[in-house]
Amino acid sequence: MTLEMLAIVLGGLTIGSALMVVLSKHPVRSVLYLVVTFFLISANYILMNAQFLAIVNIIVYAGAIMVLFLFVLMLLNLNKDSEPITSIGIKLAGIIAGGVLLTVLLAALKDGLVITQQAVESANNNGLVENLGELLFTKYVLPFEMSSVLFIASMVGAVMLAKREKQIID
Amino acid sequence: MDSGLIIEKLVLVAIIFSISLLIAMYATYFERKVAAWFQDRIGPDRAGPFGILQPLADGVKMFMKEDFIPSHSDKWLFILGPGISMFTSLITSAIIPWGEDLTIFGNTVALQVADFNIGILFIMGVLSVGIYGIMIGGWASNNKYSLFGAIRASSQMISYELAMGVSVITIVMMTGSLSLKDIVQDQHGMNWNIFYQPVCFIVFFVCALAETNRAPFDLPECESELIGGYHTEYSSMKLGFFLFAEYVSMFISSAIIAILFFGGYNFPGMDYFSGNALAILSIIAFFTKIFFFIFVFMWIRWTLPRFRFDQLMHLGWKSLIPIALINLLITGLVIALNKGWF
Amino acid sequence: MESKLTNEGVAARIQEQFGTAVVSVEMPYDMLTMEIAADQMHDVIEWIKSDAELQIGFLTLLGGVHYPNDNGREFAMVYHLHSWTNNFRIRLKAFLPAENPTIATLTDIYDGANWMERETYDFFGIRFEGHPNLVRILNEDTMDYFPMRKEYHLEDATREDKDDRYFGR
Amino acid sequence: MGKIDDIQVINGEGYQMTTLEKALGVARANSVWPLPFATSCCGIEFMATMGSNYDLARFGMERMSFSPRQADLLIVAGTISKKLGPILKQAYEQMAEPKWVLSVGACASSGGIFDTYSVLQGIDRVIPVDVYVPGCPPRPEQIIDGIMKIHELVKHEPIRRRYSDEYKHLLTSYNIESDGE
Amino acid sequence: MVLASIFESGVSIDFYIVLASVLFAIGAVGVLVRRNAIVLLMCIELMLNAVNLLMVAFSTYHGKGDGQVFVFFIMVVAAAEATVGLSILVMAYRNIRSTDVGIFNKLKG
Amino acid sequence: MQSLSNRKKVVSDKPMNFMEKIYLPAILGGMWITFKHLFRKNNTVKYPEEQRVFAPVYRGMHVLKRDEQGRENCTACGLCAVACPAEAITMEAAERVKGEENLYREEKYAATYDINMLRCIFCGLCEEACPKEAIFLTDRIVPSEFEREDFLFGKDKLVEPMNARIDVTKRQHTGQRGTK
Amino acid sequence: MSTFKEDSAYDMPHVGLSNETIDGDIATLNLGPTHPATHGIFQNVLQVDGEKILSSERTVGYIHRAFEKLAERRPYNQITPITDRLNYCSSPINNMGWHMTVICNSVIGVDTGALTGFTYVFQEREKIYELYEEICGARLTTNVGRIGGFERDFSPEFHRKLEDFLRTFPKVFNEFNSLLSRNRIFMDRTRGAGPISAERALNYGFVGPNLRAAGVDYDVRVMNPYSSYEDFDFIIPVGTDGDTYDRFMVRQEEIRQSLKIIEQAWKNLPEGSYKADIPEFYLPPKEEVYNNMEALIYHFKIVMGETPIPAGEVYHCVEGGNGELGFYLISDGGRSPYRLQFRRPCFIYYQAYPEMIIGQTISDAVLTMSSMNVIAGELDA
Amino acid sequence: MEAASTSADYLPLLIQVAVAAGFVCLVLFVTHRLGPNVHSKKKDSNWECGVESDGDARFPVSIRYFMTAILFVLFDVEVIFFYPYAVNFEKLELEGLLAVILFVAFFLVGFFYVLKKGALEWEK
Ligand code: SF4
Ligand code: SF4
Ligand code: SF4
């Protein structure tokens, strides 16, 4: 088994589980498939030696964000039947639109951005946490601080929403 | 990487696997015995001499029990729940360095399945995924107590994960590496982190109790309120997995506590040894520490009353997280002062 | 602890207040026992609670008694009340006819009366007017008789080990 | 019913317990998790049995399973009223196989002194009982004695029993549905 | 040699571009087709992840770490988006008892 | 409310001092207590293997006594059955015929004497009621059984065998004469 | 094998639990009938918002045994074994007001998961049982009181065991106490859990420790002394807010006081008979049955239930482990009571339960229940 | 640190994952085959303390659990940011420290905001 094959298998699995996210009727299953997708994407990261990101991807997406989704599903008690059925027309239109989007994307990315086909050996250590950290705290220190402001903003937003919600109930 | 290495790792994995299963099995026995001793009782003593076959009997019983799936449940998710729980607690042991390198037939064998430089993060990642087992299991059971237990469990686990993360960061700051092997080597001899970071240790320890759902944080399955909590509907080995996973996690948590704060496989006076003697002694030292912490886990379980849910959340969010953060800042500042950055 | 009130004094005071509502006064075993007209019972109990001198403000027990042979007075409601400050106990009774055993509820005076009245209803079928939720409490809802009435048997009719083997009586 | 004689029926067909089965039986017997259905005075005595002076843990029984799915032995201790009968039956029905029932005390076994309109005259009117323990309340010794009898049953139970027609018959006679595989 | 680093393999960046684009397209289709708002949000997460994947691929194939740092910030945005989005959703659900996106239109009017 | 008894004392002390607030001292204290128990001798009675002595007055399984000559004491007067609150005793009386004087002490005897041990609540009222010192409760326990039927203890199980007499002299209901 | 079964009647569990939710995050949760939190059996359907309880709906009567009816059909001397079984945690009190059982009671007040402390006290409880066994031949349903005195005198073995108990119990008890009462986890859990004000408690008819926890020092032993309680020196512990912590502390202190009383009683145990001097109520000693015609007649009469109980009515109450336990007896001169009604404190406590737990958490509800010591047998009669 | 780790380091992990997954699946399969199986409608319905429960027991849970989860997500991502810093702590020196202190300050502002607003209050 060569690496190429491994990558292709991984990619196929990723696409498959991503498809299942969209296809499965049951939202809880969607969540689980999405978690699987994230794991597979992390595996891809590892292949590209972005180790730190791989694990962070799991912690943040699979371990936190998707837990939140699951919470919401439990909170709202959404069963299979609660989703109204989309008409075939919309489905078709959606699929066609997706296909078009895909072509456009592929064309644009292929033409515009590719410089190297082969991975650069010097990138070998880019994914390591030391190097990332160095970048983060030197070059990107401003966005770093900004992101914490963003957090405060979303905290405020979430808390406000929940609070408002309480008033409605009372 | 050659096939020799793979075989070596395979054997190592097999050994570690059996050891952690064995230890978890006997942890159940030990727990029952310890509880009995604390309570001036005898504990299991009829299955085999001193009852040492008790875990076996339990295991056989569970295998032979009806594997029950309630009709309103989501069948696959119902099975998936305990599977995830067990699976996550089993794979954590991969990154634990069990001892100094061993030399067998001229080959140096690292007593660690996989050493990668983000070891601690791996643990955090597995931890955060472990929540799914309980959540899915509880949700799929379609039972109110299960759901309630599952929600309690996941709220509790995510709350304590934060404080745990922050206290881990403090240790990482002292070491400068996320690799467990580095952290252990950094504490060579008696240079244990506990001496520098007692507060951090307490926070971490409390969080470890909460993450493993051990008393006094065993609310999710607290039976006087929720019957069995998330595993109310589970029978046979699926229940066994949930219960077993707790013991495996307890074993792993003890190992990690030992690594982060008590020098892992280091022991005082280790410089006088070398080679395989050192390796074996280091393994022994490490397991002694692990057993000690397993014992402490049980000791606490049989001593303390349980928290109430709101108190538990308050403790996690309002005490532990601020304490951990402040501790982190102080650590940073002290090191900065030492280095003369100001 | 010695009581500050005497049986006679209390009886006189209640009689003075309610006059004809008091049907009879007895003192078996030193306990003041008064029979009160059923329709006045509620008021009497309310009054002795609020009266500054008596302060009989604790409902110890209420329950029914069935006297099937006493025509027109088949059911008795018995109330035991207690004044803690005076350490004085009193027993009040009211008799109800079998056709319509109804008496005013005490739930507006004592919260504790709620279940006791339900229990009395459950056992005897005495109805309490104004009770918020007068349904059976101890027995199944499906039960179709009032078991504490004297005419009903105690025994479970299905006990077989007794039938078969000539037990006792 | 559901007793040694039941087993003898199976044995009578020329069925012999294999060594493996015997070993399994012994293992099972040492890990009987009780579901305490303790209602009244007998329940208190059952708690005393769990306490350190008698220590049920010795038999590997200290893990109470309040969920019927996880329990092997339904210990009915105390008075069971007619109002409670259906609930008891539900608990029994929802237990995962294999399951046994121990009836502790006079009330549970026969109604005891409570020969009254409200008390079930013995739980064997609603569920099959494996072992009866007399007494009011039985002393812990007697309860343990009953448990030892249960162990005896467990040890001798062929694995097939829960599929056997006799067992199905037993359940049907109690109006309990069963469609094993 | 079972598992070598990707740097010695023949996997070209095209592969990751295709993979990321497909993931992105799946997400987009999901957004268009599914009407359950929660699934919709999930699809958005999927799209963001596709972008992440692309970023990492570029970073690896260009030999610069910047792409990966960027992924960080995308994660921040994803987290923020998920929290706020779900809060709104929960609030809306409380009021209208549905997570059908169609109904959100009614909120406006 | 004023004090009713003049013996009132408030015992609960709600506020916590600092040491109590930080959890740890109390927790460590508690752990120390449990730790000490680790080394304490257990006080379990391993029941089936070893047995605690019961109090001589313990009310366990019944016995129908015989007198010194081995004659049954019971005269089938039925008092025990009447006294029994659980209605657990049944008996049939029979007249003693000639030649049975060595079997029965009185002219009447119980031809059958059953106690339903599942019904019995071991209250001892039968023992108290018996005028002939014929029935006693003993400190033996009634074993558990698989079948309901096994609990109907007839005379075969109740009457004491001559070769294994049961000592009831320590029971307080025993008069001086009964055992003579 | 039993041949008798009732067919259809037992097939339908009759209480369904509504799954409907009133609003958004309100859920119904069913505690009981068979639930570890109910020490005994009753059903409690809670509506919760998160952990907070909004309402509570109770179903009781699951072990209704028809005590009162039973009492009407049994001769007086057969009633004592029945009353034993009313509150089985402290049966001798029901019979006569005996004191050690208060100790057993308090143990039940611990449902916080601290199992170990529990077992320590259980060991002592076991000793108490042994004591009972020595006195009366049974461990739990002691049945020791008789009309006109106790059944029998204390044996020397009892003396030895009691002394041993008096020596070891305080130690164990202190251990238990220090495991919990000043532990913050425990305090946090119990303080403010399930409170009830004195006024409300009175209105509901609370008595005993639960009322004393709310600050009212009502105690039958002081108000209407019986069984020579007026001779003993003891205090009445009270709490302040009537919450679980108060109840716990009050019971703890009561145990100490009980010990004190036992010690005092032990020292001053009067020489003499344990029976009142009314021969027509008490079974004569067996030897007399043989010698004395009169005794024989008494004997038959008593056993046949023909003791001359005068017609009339009486209310008597004792301080049980759960407070004022009253007996209201109407006699028509017959061999059984015409009517015997019990004042069952648990029945009254449990009524106030919703009021105490609304707004509290589920854990509080469980704790409140056990700290009130609601015993289903007594509750359901 | 010294040896740059590569993707290959994860291979043993893969082995462990495979073994663990195999074990779990095997056990789940075996236990399903071994035990007896008796079904009935009543048995298969869920356990509600002995009374019958109807249909779906998935009740909507309180919003407070949801608030906890939301805050967890936000804080968790913030905590993740500390890791690269902690590893580079010594290298980054004062500038890094100041950046982090600022970051922690923001963190704390958010935290105290949340506390102040009572989003974490589990009021009794
Ligand atoms: S058998 Fe006796 S002790 Fe047991 S529950 Fe019945 S009355 Fe109580
Ligand atoms: S001990 Fe009591 S219940 Fe048993 S037979 Fe004698 S009188 Fe009846
Ligand atoms: S045992 Fe005693 S009381 Fe009973 S019938 Fe015989 S002689 Fe009479």
Image (tube, coloured by chain):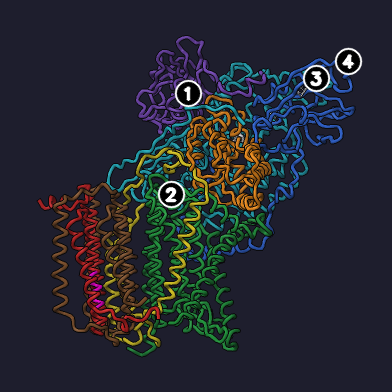
Q: Chain of mark 1?
A: C
Mark 1 — residue? C123
Which of label 3 and label 2 is nearer to you? 3
Of marks 3 and 4, the one in the foreground? 4
Left or right position of B277 against G187: right
| Chain ID, cyan in image | G
Is residue F41 among the parts visible in the rendering? yes
Name the image quarter holding the C terminus of chain C: top right
Q: Please determine if labels 2 and 1 lie on a single subunit.
A: no
Give, as a three-letter code, the residue at label 1. Phe
Label 4 vs label 1: CA separation?
Answer: 56 Å
User: Which one is in front in this view, the residue at disc 2 or the one at disc 4?
Assistant: 4
* Residue count near mark 3 (Cα–Cα under 10 Å), binned few <14, some 14–19, many ≥20: many
Q: Which chain is red?
A: E
Image quadrant occupied by the N terminus of chain C = top right
User: Which labelled disc corresponds to residue F109?
Assistant: 3
Q: Spatial distance from mark 3 to mark 1, Cα to Cα? A: 44 Å
In the picture, the disc for residue G364 is 2
Q: Dot 4, how many residues are within 10 Å of its Cα: few (below 14), some (14-19), or many (20+)? A: few
State which region is magenta: E50-57
> Circle 4 is placed at which residue position?
F98
The subunit carrying tag 3 is: F
Chain represented in yellow: H
Colour in which chain B is shown? green
Is residue B15 on the magenta stretch?
Answer: no
Colour used to depict chain A in the structure image: brown
